[in-house]
Structures are given as C-alpha cells and as structure tokens.
Image (spheres, helix red, strand yellow):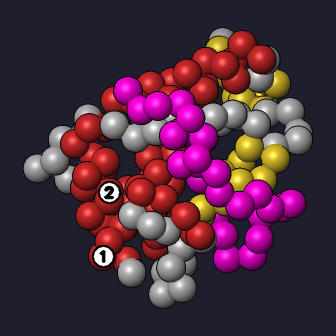
Amino acid sequence: MPDPIEAVGFWAVQEVPKLPEDWSTVPENGWGLLVAASLIAEGHSDRVARTRHLEPRIGEIEDAAGKRPFTLTAEDEASIAEDINQYLQDAGAPEVPDVVTYDWLIRPPSHLSASAFWSGATAQFFDPAVGNHPSTLYPVLRRWVRTLS
C-alpha cells in the first residue's frame, strides 16, 4: 500500500479557480482517477489539475416512481471516495486525498480533443488481452500515456 504522505505529494497538482478552456473534467470514478494517476506517474503532472467542488453533488436514483435527482450526503461522498481509493489501491497507484473535495481536471495533449483523449483511454480498458483488473490496467494506461508525448 502506498505511503499516505507520498500520496499527498503525488496528487499535489495545480489548483485552479475554475475549469480552464481546453481542459476536461475527470469522471468521478476509479477509472477516471487512474487515467489521471497515469499522467502524473509518467511525468505529466502539468496535465492534471483540480478545482474546488463547491456545489452540492447531485446523483440520480431510479425506482418505481422513475428517475429523479438527489443530493449526495456526506456518507454517500465517503463511500465514493472509499470505492475510488480502493480501485487505485488495487491498481498500485497512490490514493487520492480529498477525492470528493475537488473536481479533477485533465488537459489533453494539443493534438487530441478531450473526446479523443477519453476515447483513447477508454480503449485501453476494453482490450480483452489485458483484462479489466486495475492492477493490469495501470501499466497499460501508463504505456499509452507515454505514446501521447
């Protein structure tokens, strides 16, 4: 398990006041943060940033009455953070301190749109030769990130 102090340093990326142009919000899940971790691990921490999440987080619930939004509680956010960090731990990547305090951002390389960047990252996830366990995906993502330079 990575050292928590090292994890803080690993994720110490620039904090910006709002989403800058040409940047993309990282999906708030283990996969999205593993992509961000891959960029940082491969020396591209300048392509990862964070901005404080100030609004209440809204989820969606579906039951017999249909789909409707709801505000996530502190317990919901703690569960999200725990799941994301477990995913990162399973991958061998450092956990994210204060994962739900921030929206995490990525600046794709200039030759890729945000959509093309995320499509490329997602393609790594769906390679049947690799499998989909985080421990097998992290090295694949890191190799993919190296090809982006």
How far is disc 1 from disc 2 in space, using C-alphas? 10 Å
Q: Is residue 82 magenta?
A: no
The answer to whether residue 49 is left or right of residue 3 is: right
Q: What range of the chain is rendered magenta?
A: 1-30
Quadrant in the rendering for residue 55 = top right
- Picture coordinates of residue 13, whole percent (x, y): 65, 57
Q: Earlier in the sequence, mark 1 or mark 2?
A: 2
Task: Quadrant for the N terminus, please.
Answer: top left
Query: Which residue was labeled with disc 1?
Result: 147
Q: Looking at the picture, which amino acid does disc 2 mark? A: Leu
Q: Pointer 1: residues within 10 angstroms few (<14), some, or many (20+)?
A: few
Residue at 61% of width from left, 18% of height from top?
79
- Residue nearest the viewer, comparing 97 with 23: 97
Query: Which residue was labeled with disc 2?
Result: 141
Task: Quadrant for the C terminus, please.
Answer: bottom left
Quadrant in the rendering for residue 61 = top right
Q: Looking at the picture, which amino acid does disc 1 mark? A: Thr
Number of labels in the image equals 2
Give above or below for 7 relative to 121. above
- Picture coordinates of residue 148, whole percent (x, y): 37, 77
Mark seen at residue 89: none
Give above or below for 21 relative to 8. below
The answer to whether residue 135 is left or right of residue 43 is: left
Give above or below for 107 relative to 28. below
- Picture coordinates of residue 125, whole percent (x, y): 30, 50
From this viewpoint, is residue 30 visible?
no
